[in-house]
Image: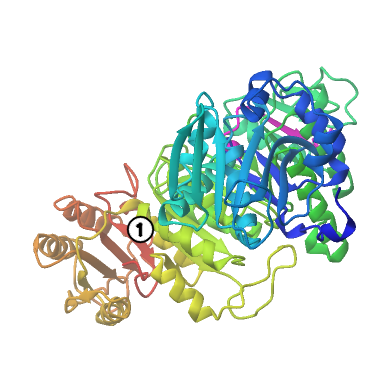
Amino acid sequence: MDTPSDQHAYPAHWEADVVLRDGGTARIRPITADDADRLVSFYEQVSDESKYYRFFAPYPRLSAKDVRRFTHHDHVDRVGLAVTIGGEFIATVRYDRIDDRGMPASAPADEAEVAFLVQDAHQGRGVASALLEHIAAVARERGIRRFTAEVLPANTKMIKVFTDAGYQQKRSFEDGVVRLEFGLEPTDRSLAVQHAREQRAEARSVQRLLAPGSVAVVGVGRTLGGVGRSILRNIREAGFTGPVHAVNQGFPDTGDTVEGVRAHRSVRDIAEPVDLAVIAVPAERVPEAVAECGEHGVQGLVVISAGYAEQGPEGRERQRALIRQARSYGMRVIGPNAFGVINTTPETRLNASLAPELPVPGRVGLFTQSGAIGIALLSALHRDGGGADGVPNPTGVSTFVSAGNRADVSGNDVMQYWYDDPHTDVALMYLETIGNPRKFTRLARRTAAAKPLVVVQGARHSGITPTGHPAPVTRLPYATVSALLRQAGVIRVDTVTELVDVGLLLAGQPLPAGPRVAILGNSESLGLLSYDACLSQGLRPLPPRDLTTDATPEDFRAALAAALADDGCDAVVVTAIPWVGADGVPERPDGEALGAALRTAHATAPDKPVVVVHVELGGLAEALSAAAGTGPGSPATQRGPAPSPAA
């Protein structure tokens, strides 16, 4: 029997929330003596076949002795972990330290026998793989260097969990049992397996939020106006492809309609499955709404409601409670205090945000920790991206996430989603905090290797953490963070305007074959500024060609065509200022003729990028992005005195 001296303090640091293969969440924690009833209930729901695989014999129920043995641990030589959803067990794992004869032992013995049991309804969700990662980390902490496991040959799922983990293994077959032995020191392969599992799970969890099959808006007002009513209207007007439900406990009767959709007093009253719930009720009513969503099986939440960590210590605790509650039901959360999410793909067409219209569909993904910056980014892309409203355009938006207080879903999660999202070619991020620089740079390096990743970092010098964010501003100096981003292949810019300009350039232009940049234009000063900017970014600019202020659109066309035909040029920067008339008075043409001339020249070499920097030439941007929109074959355009760093 365990005595108080046998027991060690409860290891709270072993508790963790994990994202499973299907995008749902669960909690892993040590099993305690208080879990007897949960263990019995869990075991009753496991199939006879799974029980047989665990104990190698028919084992219909646990005895009182079994229950005690499986719930009383010293957290050193005997450790048990459980995976819980909604407070109930869905899986368990246990290790017992053994000596070289397989008998119970204590340190310095460094081997342990490990065994799993996963509820049948949750098999195939990656539960056992996540448990193996955690129990291995716990074992290493307690001085165990090697696991052994005995598995029946027919239990192919569990054998696969062990063999796919990536550890150094030895396998044998004796007396009808497969015996597996493996060291617990991480290997390149085991780390790669863990990172791949993490990427799939986190990407899937974001996909469930961005591509739901059905949506409920909780907090829809009965009269016009209000946040909930506005979001419901935005979802409807965007043409969301799935069912939409309006929820407000003040509705007189389920069966009424609001904004053309069914109205319900509670999420529980919705007869159909709901994948995503957008919550826009006062903070004090959010827990009730979350409970209703969890009990109904909702997969994810976007919490628009304010009144959380941005309002001080009381709100911060309310925010922690929100995340604990949502995760207990296996739900992920965007927010609270979020602006919302957008997905323009034809299969979804979701505008679950406060943006009044769905952006032009395109290939640019946006993540921001600020609703205000999100509005600015969406507006700038809509204004500068070109193309007709609603017509797909490379410089339009694929997905948009405004994470608000970023209490759960973060930029790391969205990067995991973008990594293999076929609809996103360029990723733009506005970050106010980087809570885990090591993981961020690892994910950024992987993402940037697949598609351009552009980042602007807010709160760079003030050291002030936005009040709603759970993670403090990284204490690394700004120069160090910049160096980490650069080494990871991230394109770092200084302003939101540059973020948009670089995003448009990357989405609409081909990559240059090399660093050689031709510069031409009718302003010697702008040419020199462009030359210096290219040098500062490690490019190899050619001497600027000054066309003089007398240059006509035809002169621009001929000069650009010649530069593009030059095998010693990989990209071109064109600078333009208003013409000077014969009487010496500056003229301000609308730029349409110049735009047409530049497009004609670029068509002769569409595989080379062209950036146009212009000053007060009205109509030039529209002329360059006309017809098919900004894209390969159409020069990118930028207003300002110098090209962006990406030029």
Which quarter of the rendered picture does the C terminus lie within? bottom left
* Label 1: which secondary element: helix
In-image side of 446 versus 47 (left or right) = left
Pinpoint residue 39: horizontal percent, then vertical percent: 80, 34
Most foreground residue, 502 or 188: 188
- What span is colored magenta in the figure? 208-222
Residue behind mark 1: 505
Residue 126 lies in the magenta-colored region = no
Image position of 413 with respect to 361: above or below: below
Q: Position of residue 611 (x, y in %)?
A: 29, 63
Q: Is residue 213 left or right of residue 640?
A: right
Q: How is the image coloured?
A: rainbow
- Image location of residue 438, percent across then percent down: 53, 66
- Residue 19, percent from left and from top: 62, 44
Q: Nearer the viewer, residue 434 or 571?
A: 434
Q: Determine whether 557 is above or below 68 in the image.
A: below
Q: Amino acid at mark 1?
A: Leu
Q: Quick one: label 1, few (<14), some, or many (20+) residues within 10 Å?
A: many
Q: Residue at x 66, y 29 (%)?
A: 55
Question: Which quadrant would residue 229 be assigned to in this image?
Answer: top right
